[in-house]
Structure formats: C-alpha cells, structure tokens
Amino acid sequence: MRIEAVDFFYLAMPQVTTAADGSQDALVVRVSAGGLTGWGECEASPLVSMAAFVTPMSHGACRPVSASVLGHEVNGPDDIRAMAARIAYDSMDLLQAPHTWSGIEMALWDLLGRARGEPAWRLLGQAQAFPKTPYASVLFGADAQETLQRARAIRAQGFRAAKFGWAPFGDSLQGDEDQLAAAREGLGADGILLIDAGQIFGADVEAAAQRLPAMERARVTWFEEPFAAGALSAYAALAARSGSVGVAGGEAAHDRDMALHLIDHGAVRFIQIDCGRIGGLGPAREVAQYAAARGVTYVNHTFTSNLALSASLQPYVGLEDHRICEYPTGLSALAQELTVTRIAPDANGLIHAPDAPGLGVEVNEATLERYRVPVEIRVGGRVILSA
C-alpha cells in the first residue's frame, strides 16, 4: 500500500483557556493508503505540528515530515520503522517533527491493523491483552475543599484510583499539605492516590522534598513530574530521598532515548509515555519493554480523546504486571465527542484495550466538522497547506 494522503483536522473549543486541560483543542490525523484509512492524534501545538509537515526544506537535515511519508509504502511494521528512521535523520533540526510524526505513526498502525484484521497491540508483538486499572485523571481544586469534593465524586463513580495535578499545587507548603490530606480523605483509605506537580519545582530538589512527609502520610503512590523533563540529576536526587513515594515522569519525552535516560539516570519508578509525543506506538513499545526488564513500571499518558486513550494502551497491554492506566475524566465536549467508540470501565472497574482491528476506535466525523478550525499556510504567495 502506498501512502496517498495525510489529512489534518485542527479542532478547538470556542474558548481555549490557560487551564492545564489538554483536551481544549486537538490535532487529528487521517492517513489514506490502499483504499483504507487510519486515524491518529498528535499531542502538541496543532498549528506548529501542521507546519512541520509542509514547511519548505531548510537544508538536508531540516526537511518537512511529508517528504518521509507521502508516496512511501506501508505494508508492514518494518515500513513504519523505516519512515521513523528517515524522519529522525532528515528532519533532525525540525524540532516539532516527532510530535507531527507521532499522530501519523499512530494512524499508520491503525491503518495496518485494519488491513490485516488485527489489533495494533498484536502487530506490536503482544500475544494477549491484559486489563488495566484506570485512574481518574483530574486537576486539583482551587482549594482543599474543592479537591475533597472531586475525590469523593471520583470514588462515587467507582474509581479505585485518582490522580490530582497542577495548580495550585506548589503555591505553598501548607496549601499542598491540605490538598494532599483532602485528596486522601475523599478517595478513601484504600484508594490509590497519585500526584502530578506539573514540573512546578523546575530543578529545586529541596522544594519538592519538603512535600514528601505529607505525601507519605497521605500514602501517595507516585510524585509525578516534580521537575522539568531534562532535569535528570534532580529526579535522581529526589528518588534517593522519596521513600515509599515513587518518582514518576516521562510524558515530555519526544523520543525513545529521552525516556530511557529518565529510567537510567533519573531513577524513576514509573515511566509515563505519551504516544502522541514520543513518536507513536513503536518507540512507546520499546520503552515499555525496556522498563519491564529493569523493574520500572510503565504507565500510559493521555489526557484527550478515546482515540488517544486507545493508542496509549496498545504498547503495554501485554505486560500483565503493569496494571495502572491513565483515564481522563472531565474532558471537553470536543474530546468526548471525537469518537463514536467509548472505552469505559467494566463491571469490575477495569479498562480493556479494544480487540477490533487497528486502534479499534471509530472517529465521529460530524465532530470533525463541528469543531474544525480552517487552516491555510502560504509561503511566497503559494498555498502549501489547506485544511
């Protein structure tokens, strides 16, 4: 099958705010080849990602992503890996290229799975798909009382685990201690409590470490992204002091090696990978295997639609002991309506990756039109992208 077209859909809510809610807009990708289509979703600035696909070549190591994709054959996993290698080399100076490629790569696995009648996870070399325990992924409330109410609501919905993240966490030590206590109270004594600091401490190990005693009292399972993505020494220093609280990170990795460095040099206990950033399902699968061999728990990262959720599950459903998975709640209408398919907890509160071909998710094309923002990119008066 030869790749005939790659189409982008820039979607956005009527109003996009500064809230740390990645579901307010989306970049959906459709790839066409051999009379079939596959769907993917990039996790990065949509307009910049679209530009990376069509930008004119600056030099041999700064070529558009389209040059490595359009017209090329996709008949098996090796063809997808070959495209990834071309982009890594020919677009090495185009920093948005991995994010653009992530959505395309995702769509190629979807397309290949549909062509072969197999789910993507099986094409990635996994014989069986094990269920996962979903954690409700939400933002902290504006104050401890609001967080308490959110935690109670999550537990009432049947979730055993929840992650609270981002502002106002990090504003003050007392405020954070109150937030942690509220989250634990609302979730219940047996709930799995996870905390996401949203990189608020930069590389300040002491500031992050001040929160550890309260986290231990609240029986927090992991302390996610306390530092900037590349602050490996800070991650390792905190990990050496974190006691029962595991340090987690990895969602910002936009290639396999960034994730492996966080494991090897950042000493994280949980490696969290976003298929919409790291380059798709292939490198995510490699990280999952690497982590499993080193006793590090692999966790998916996703905060958008069920399309992205399904993609995030594919690389590690075959790892039985890596049981926890992110399950976004409180999504925008755009993200909720993007797919006809719904991945929901079963009667036991567990999540299952779709067993249908490809990603096993059907996109609601009416939603594409409802939230679509028209885009046109011109260079020298010539239109190089119209979407």
Image (cartoon, helix red, strand yellow):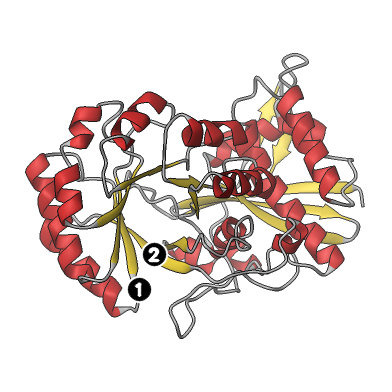
Label 2 Cα neighbours within 10 Å, binned few <14 / some 14-19 / many ≥20:
many
**Which amino acid type corresponds to the residue marked 2 in the rendered image?**
Tyr
Q: Which residue is mark 2?
A: 135
Mark on residue 147?
A: none
- Residue 169, by quadrant, is top left
- Residue 352, by quadrant, is bottom right
Extreme residue in the top direction = 59
Q: Can you give x and y, in whole percent of width and height, for residue 348 in the image?
A: 45, 82
Instruction: Determine whether the residue tagged by mark 2 lies in a helix, strand or loop.
Output: strand
Q: Can you give x and y, in whole percent of width and height, for residue 321 in the image?
A: 52, 62
Q: Please name the residue shown 65% across and 44% down the image.
A: 286
Q: Can you say whether 183 is above or below 209 in the image? A: below
Q: Are the residues flagged by discs 1 and 2 in contact, CB closer than 8 Å?
A: yes
**Which amino acid type corresponds to the residue marked 1 in the rendered image?**
Phe
Would residue 143 be seen by someone viewing this image from the given angle?
no
Extreme residue in the bottom direction = 347
Q: Please name the residue shown 15% across and 55% down the image.
A: 217
Q: Can you give x and y, in whole percent of width and height, for residue 278 in the image?
A: 59, 40
**C-alpha distance separating marks 1 and 2:** 7 Å
Q: Is residue 179 left or right of residue 321?
A: left
Q: Which residue is mark 1?
A: 159
- Residue 67, by quadrant, is top right
Nearer the observer, 43 or 253:
253
Instruction: Determine whether the residue tagged by mark 1 lies in a helix, strand or loop.
Output: loop
Q: Please name the residue shown 41% across and 45% down the image.
A: 269
Q: Which sits earlier in the primary sequence, circle 1 or circle 2? A: 2
Would residue 136 be seen by someone viewing this image from the given angle?
yes
